[in-house]
């Protein structure tokens, strides 16, 4: 299957300035899918091989060598740098202890903002002992951050609205984090460095979100949910301020969790986080006390719902990008980052429940965990 | 027998790579007793380009811009006065735009790839005058508020504001590009298990020295993402930070240029801050890479 976000496209655009075919590129003519929609400016990319076929996207560092027709300089492809598909994610999980984080929430709840804020904050320095140790998805992060930066030419920060994940496949952002766990004494008496953990973070596409809410089988058929170490359910704080909306959106969050429990994808190996986003808006509202009380009841109800059925449950309030250069610590995301990085309940073993319909993606993620067990046993 | 050593000089545009090379060439070819750890014994290839750089440096002129896709390699045979060793040194002079292009286009030339696989170290240039950081719009709002300015109104279609600029990967923040470069280099050093020696060179150090921060502290503060990256991946990278002013001052400022040209020995223009020491031996970062590589291989 041709990877829609592959680092190399078998078709290229002849129109100057069009970025289609580059990682996270977009069609200058506005086609959502220029290949399927027959964009008139697309031509076959001869550099992609005599058969014109798609280049493989299965290696972090692509072994293909291609020749640039413009300069006749032979080049070697680097790792793609865009959001990882499941095959590329496998290369991460197979090499290092990896936490898989699934972020779930209705459109505009703040999924993207939550994820990007952590990346943005690391550009300023370590966060209470957590340090940035790398990423395999710098293009994805940078493109998403663009509209909130001065260079975008905008007057106010915006977050890219396009989803990370496609309905048919999850895409992952990758962060390597040096933990804040204390340094340990090595066997030779020297100090060992802090452990490094890889995070693969994905969100649920809005379409899938609705399907899961309405049908447990849909959750059962989603490989990434079986592999999630952390399941993060977001609730829009801005909507909580609206007395009519708050019941509906918290009910939706409960329905999602119930569906996932019924499907068996949330289990005692999963850490569930209930996150109230945009809490700066709540605090600034005239009904802040009401919302706090309402939220507390919903947290209690969720805890009761999950009790004995998942590994751990946490509730958080975050304030997204209210102060991107301020302290992450002050708006609650540090607790999330700390849990994602330091906590894991699922030590891979043979008792992994088989999904309703095993798919290649799931197989790969499970295989990667078996490799992890082997390499660290 | 001479040891073969490959060093990559890397950085975004205007980060000081060519100025460094021009001054380095002058030093290693005009060294008096003990002035430099390294002295040149032989040069391989065409001298025209490196001598152009040297002449521009001697004349306190702005450096000629390295063309994109240049395949210029500075290949020197050097003698290390400390260890007594002879070594062959290869430094390709790539333009800053080349490095931005590798980040954006996700490929680099095969001849560079071949060099990368046997790299001993990287001279990684960062500059307080060039480079780019990702300034968040809310910071500007916060600064405006602090200055007592009114908040900028929400833009409307009718307001006639310029159209937003589309994302261009080449314009990503410099620390992000450099982290990616080091990651890509590590990917290609397939048969090497020893850490890559990275000499972080903060150019135009003369503009920063009055601030009282040492090079390592400035790097930690201003290039936080890159600092975290090289610090935490200790098994992949060994790094040391230098503050270097190869020109000694802003050569576009006439009084400064006059002062620099009045110095009898051009090497006296050079400022190298290495830990607590200050010297004008520009070969120090290279000597550190060579010593570290020798120790690793020995």
Image (cartoon, rainbow, N blue to C red):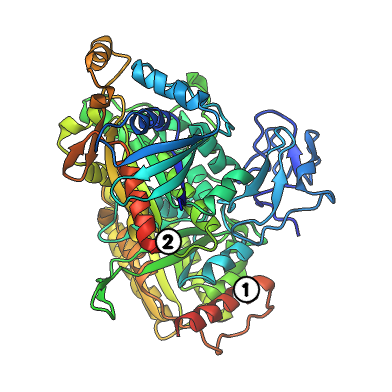
The structure residue drawn at horizontal position 57% and vertical position 44%, both measured from the top left corner, is B112
Rendering coords of residue A74 (x, y %): 69, 43
Q: Which residue appears farthest toward the front when viewing the image? A: B1
Q: Residue at x 81, y 34 (%)?
A: A40
The x and y percentages for residue B269 are 25, 24
What chain is tagged by disc 2?
Answer: A
Q: Nearer the viewer, residue B67 or A298?
A: B67
Frontmost residue, B37 versus A365: B37
Q: Tell me if residue A158 can be seen.
A: no
Q: Is residue A375 visible?
A: yes
Question: In the picture, residue A335 is in which quadrant?
Answer: bottom left
**Above-or-below relation of B226 to A264:** above
Q: Quadrant of residue A317?
A: bottom left
The quadrant of the picture occupied by the C terminus of chain B is: bottom left
Secondary structure type for disc 1: helix
Which residue, as the protein is rendered here, is positioned at the far right? A51
Alpha-carbon span between mark 1 and mark 2: 20 Å
- Marks 1, 2 in one chain: yes
Determine the residue positioned at 28% across, 34% down.
Answer: B244
Please report, as a chain letter, where disc 1 is located. Answer: A
Tally the marks.
2
Q: For this rendering, which residue is in front, A119 or B185? A: B185
Give the camera-side residue of B114 and B218: B114
Say few, some or many: other residues with alpha carbon within 10 Å of mark 1 (under 14 / 14 to 19 / 20 or more).
Answer: many
Horizontal side of residue A168 vs A164, given as left or right: right
Instruction: Where is residue A174? Give x, y as percent.
Output: 49, 59
* Spot occupied by residue B174 in the image (x, y as percentages of width and height): 42, 39
Closer to the N terminus: mark 1 or mark 2?
A: 2
Question: Neighbour class for label 2 at 10 Å: few (<14), some, many (≥20)?
Answer: many
Residue bearing mark 2: A176
The mark found on residue A364 in the picture is: 1
Above/below status of A198 relative to B48: below
């Amino acid at each position: 299957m041709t990877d829609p976000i592959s680092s190399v496209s078998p078709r290229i655009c002849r129109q100057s300035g069009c970025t289609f075919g580059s990682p996270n590129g977009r069609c200058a003519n506005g086609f959502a899918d220029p290949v399927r929609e027959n964009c008139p400016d697309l031509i076959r990319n001869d550099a992609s091989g005599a058969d014109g076929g798609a280049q493989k996207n299965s290696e972090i560092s692509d072994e293909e060598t291609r020749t640039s027709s413009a300069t006749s300089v032979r080049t070697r492809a680097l790792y793609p740098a865009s959001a990882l598909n499941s095959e590329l994610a496998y290369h991460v999980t197979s090499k290092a202890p990896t936490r898989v984080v699934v972020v779930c929430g209705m459109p505009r709840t703040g999924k993207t903002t939550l994820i990007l804020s952590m990346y943005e904050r690391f550009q300023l320095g370590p966060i209470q002992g957590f340090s940035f140790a790398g990423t395999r998805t710098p293009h994805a992060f940078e493109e998403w951050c663009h509209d909130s930066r001065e260079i975008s030419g905008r007057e106010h920060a915006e977050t890219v609205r396009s989803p990370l994940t496609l309905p048919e496949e999850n895409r992952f952002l990758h962060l390597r984090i040096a933990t804040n766990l204390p340094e340990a004494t090595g066997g030779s008496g020297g100090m060992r460095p802090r452990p490094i953990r890889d995070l693969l973070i994905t969100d649920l596409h809005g379409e899938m979100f609705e399907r899961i809410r309405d049908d447990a089988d849909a959750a059962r058929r989603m490989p990434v949910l079986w592999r999630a170490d952390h399941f993060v359910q977001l609730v829009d704080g801005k909507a909580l301020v609206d007395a009519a909306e708050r019941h509906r959106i918290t009910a939706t969050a409960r329905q999602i969790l119930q569906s996932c429990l019924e499907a068996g994808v949330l289990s005692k190996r999963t850490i569930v986080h209930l996150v109230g986003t945009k809490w700066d808006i709540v605090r600034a509202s005239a009904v802040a006390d009401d919302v706090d009380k309402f939220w507390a009841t919903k947290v209690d109800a969720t805890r009761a719902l999950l009790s004995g059925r998942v590994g751990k449950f946490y509730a958080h309030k975050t304030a997204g990008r209210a102060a991107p250069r301020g302290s992450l610590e002050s708006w609650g995301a540090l607790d999330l980052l700390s849990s994602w990085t330091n906590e894991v309940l699922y030590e891979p073993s043979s008792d992994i429940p088989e999904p309703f319909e095993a798919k290649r993606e799931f197989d790969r993620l499970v295989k990667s965990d078996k490799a992890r067990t082997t390499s660290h046993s | 027998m001479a040891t073969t050593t490959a060093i990559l000089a890397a950085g975004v545009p205007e980060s000081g790579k060519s100025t460094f090379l021009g001054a380095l060439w002058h030093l290693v070819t005009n060294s008096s007793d003990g002035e430099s750890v390294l002295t040149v014994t032989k040069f391989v290839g065409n001298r025209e380009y490196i001598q152009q750089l040297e002449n521009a440096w001697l004349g306190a002129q702005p450096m000629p811009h390295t063309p994109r896709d240049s395949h210029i390699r500075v290949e020197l045979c050097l003698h290390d006065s400390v260890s007594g060793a002879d070594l062959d040194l290869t430094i390709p002079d790539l333009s800053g735009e080349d490095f931005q292009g590798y980040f954006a286009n996700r490929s680099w030339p095969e001849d560079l790839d071949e060099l990368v696989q046997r790299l001993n170290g990287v001279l990684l240039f960062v500059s307080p005058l060039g480079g780019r950081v990702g300034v968040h719009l809310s910071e500007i709002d916060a600064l405006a508020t602090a200055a007592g300015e009114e908040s900028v109104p929400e833009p409307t279609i009718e307001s006639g504001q310029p159209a937003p600029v589309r994302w261009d990967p080449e314009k990503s923040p410099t620390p992000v590009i450099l982290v990616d470069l080091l990651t890509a280099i590590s990917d290609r050093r397939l048969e090497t298990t020893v850490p890559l020696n990275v000499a972080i060179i903060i150019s135009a150090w003369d503009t920063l020295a009055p601030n009282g921060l040492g090079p390592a502290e400035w790097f930690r503060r201003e290039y936080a993402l890159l600092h975290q990256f090289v610090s935490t991946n200790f098994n992949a990278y060994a790094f040391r930070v230098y503050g270097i002013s190869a020109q000694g001052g802003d050569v576009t400022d006439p009084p400064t240029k006059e002062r620099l040209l009045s110095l009898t020995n051009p090497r006296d223009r050079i400022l190298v801050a290495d830990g607590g020491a200050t010297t004008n031996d520009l070969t120090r970062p290279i000597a550190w890479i060579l010593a570290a590589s020798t120790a690793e291989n020995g």
